[in-house]
Image (cartoon, coloured by chain):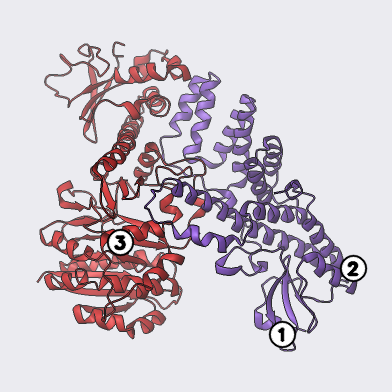
Chain colours: A purple, B red
Amino acid sequence: MGDAAYNPFGLADARLASQLVSGLAASGHYAAAIAGWRENAAWMFHRCGVSWHELFLLIEVMDDFMHARGKGDPVPQFHRHVGHLIQNRSPFDMAWQCYAVGLGLAPGHAETLYNLATLVLRRGDRDRAYAMFEAASRLPAAANAQAHAFITANAQWRCGELLEEMGRDEEAAERYRTALAAVGGFGPDQVKYPRLLQHLHRLEDATRAFEGMMSYSHRYAPEFIPPASGIDLMPPNGMCGAPPTPLSVLRVAEAPDGAAIVSYAGLYYRLPPHQRAPETGEALLRMAVPRGLRWIIRPLVRCAPSLDQLQHQG
Amino acid sequence: MKPFALTTCVWGDLHTDAMIGSMFPTLLAPNNLPTLAQAFDVTYRIFTTHRDAERLVKHPLVGVISNHVNVQFIVATHEEEPDPTHHVHWYDQAIHDARTNHSLLAFLPPDVAWSGVTLGNMGRRMAEGRLGTAMPYIRVVTETALPAIKALAKASDGSLDIAAGDLVRLAVEHLHPLSASVMDSSRHGRPSLEKLWRVADEGFVLRHMVRELFSFDPARMQISHLWYAGAGVRPEDIHIVVDSDDMFMLSFAPLRKDVPLFLQDHPVDGIDVARSSLHPLNDTPLNMHFARHRVRLHYGATTPQRWRRAQAKSDIVFKQAMVAREAIQIWTAIRATGRCTIASQFLSAGLHASPMARRWPTDEPLTILVPTDAAFAGSPPWHLISGQCRDPLYRWLLGHVSAGPYDPIAGLSGRRSLAGTPLAHIAPAKALGVSRHTVLLTDQLPVQ
């Protein structure tokens, strides 16, 4: 995992995606339509990132189980199949890359910023993660966010955790209080708030906060609750149900005249008959952009076209 | 013969495929449906959609099942993709119908695999007069487990007889992250009423706070919304399975089911289980009874020493769960009086910031003195809430509790607290029954 891969705002692929948008503008598409594509594509990258991010978590859960097994115990099939699922990729890197491209296309998406911040924190960059959670807490949640995601409150809570680690306890307590006021309960994580109040010798406040732990509550992981947007642009899954790879050139169909239909970065391209599909997005764009992106078919689709539509669209 | 209704609610390719590929073949194992059908007058009702009824009714395995029991398809909706809540309504209808017909009832989920003796053993327990049976299960990944079970060699009638030990081994091979996350070794947990401890090379110890009933007699008992044993059911009425050789099943779930539920970097602990058990949908009169059972899910030879070690670990966590559950029940009761806000705060702090749940010294019924707000005379001992006072806070709480039930005639004469301090000087103002304990409100503070 090279450092370049961890620059969330300077990825080569983000540059390519932006180039694609510029290309659309040059080819005469309306600005509003391009903005719509940019927004949808950003959510598509977010969703693809979530798909890889989920896999990263599930692998950790199953790894813990593996570590507790005996020599004679069967190996879970998950471990035999995970290689097919991840296709020699790192789920962590793939999630990171997808979120980074999504943010490159739409820097104001609180959900994507939050998700990328969880990975930044996981990598150990606390200061950078804090800045990202802080920004996410001030951005509006997506219009069609799911009710139980509570992205703003979760970002506030994460800020509280990091402020506490930094020794900024009073600020941390205020962040916890704000987050709890918004959602009522944070499940087992909530105990951090009264414990911090104990540490601050705000003992009466601590007792009241401990009472908040007595009733059942649950904190859903918002990073795995994407807004309803973006699914219509998702590229096809890989082999064996592997998560989608939006930054690969994926061949999805072949037209009757021999033209290949490929997917890249949330768009579908119809290559001329007998034109060999390029292997990288960069190569694809080198071919497409000078020609005014005339190979892009239905770049502004709101619903993924069926393969049949793709095959017959010239 | 006593009527016995079996019920499945199913629709959609995912579930009908699992039913045909796994549930039906294992249901037909000789000691499952065929044995049950010899002891009861069995009717098997399948609630489904038009499309799936057409597909299922022609399936050869349905024909084989019909050789043993009366099979009925019930199309209860005009929709082909009904809302998931439909299955709850259909199961509720099955309960109503069984109650009317004085029939026993069991739910057969479509996406499971049964061990080869499960239904036969369940039938025997019900024939003995039990009101219900509660069976453990483990979640497995549909994408790998279902093809593996489909690939197993079937008998000529399509039946598949999987020994319990082999089914537990399959559970390990196809373990779902949802089940892996409640393992003692998992760094990531989820909301749970159960926890698993691994016994290397041999299986798992399972502890649970409650379990939905597999079979029950709806005419003789109340059932909760989630099909737990309801009010009025006695512990001895329910057969709780404690060994996978008795009854056991695998439950299929797609790999990515319920990922947002995971609690990252938080393993399931006893207080989590207690809190989940007090969610209104999970809170039943038998929860403490369930919690005392160690369930053994095993394969191959068993080594007593290994199992004792895992069971001892499970005892520690479930003791914590049971203490926490009762502490929360007491907290709820005293808070509701409106006169004990300070005491309720100290109890909640004690549960989360003292060794109380882990070290509680007795499992007896208790007499608990709860000072009213007036008793503190405006100066509660807030210093006990300090992080440095974990042990003093615990001792302070013990000073309010006496082991044994309360006798209103004898009062507190001669009684001492669990901290060893005398309680005779306390004059209770009001007594409340909470679970098996007595809570005495008082305007005095015990001697510390």
The residue sitting at 24% across, 27% down in the picture is B362
Q: Place residue A262 in its image quadrant.
A: bottom right
- Subunit of label 3: B
Q: Are marks 2 and 3 in contact (CB under 8 Å)?
A: no
Observer-nearest residue: A71 or B28? A71
**Relative to B338, residue B216 above or below:** below
The residue carrying mark 1 is A255
Q: Which mark is residue A26?
A: 2
Q: Which mark is residue B32?
A: none
Residue B275: x and y, percent? 38, 40
Location of the C terminus of chain B (image quadrant): top left
Q: Nearer the viewer, mark 1 or mark 3?
A: 3
Observer-nearest residue: A54 or B186? B186
Location of the N terminus of chain B (image quadrant): bottom left
Residue B257: x and y, percent? 48, 59
**What amino acid type is highlighted by mark number 1?**
Ala
Q: Quick check: A105 left or right of B120? A: right
Helix or strand or loop: what does disc 1 sit on?
loop
> Could you classify mark 3 by the number of other residues whose Cα lies within 10 Å: few (under 14), some (14-19), or many (20 or more)?
some
Spatial separation of the CA atoms under disc 2 and disc 3:
64 Å
Spatial separation of the CA atoms under disc 2 and disc 1:
27 Å
Residue A172: x and y, percent? 61, 29
- The answer as to whether the residues below labels 2 and 1 share one chain is yes
The residue carrying mark 3 is B166
**Relative to B323, residue B183 above or below:** below
Spatial separation of the CA atoms under disc 1 and disc 3:
49 Å
**What amino acid type is highlighted by mark number 2?**
Ala
Q: Nearer the viewer, mark 2 or mark 1?
A: 1
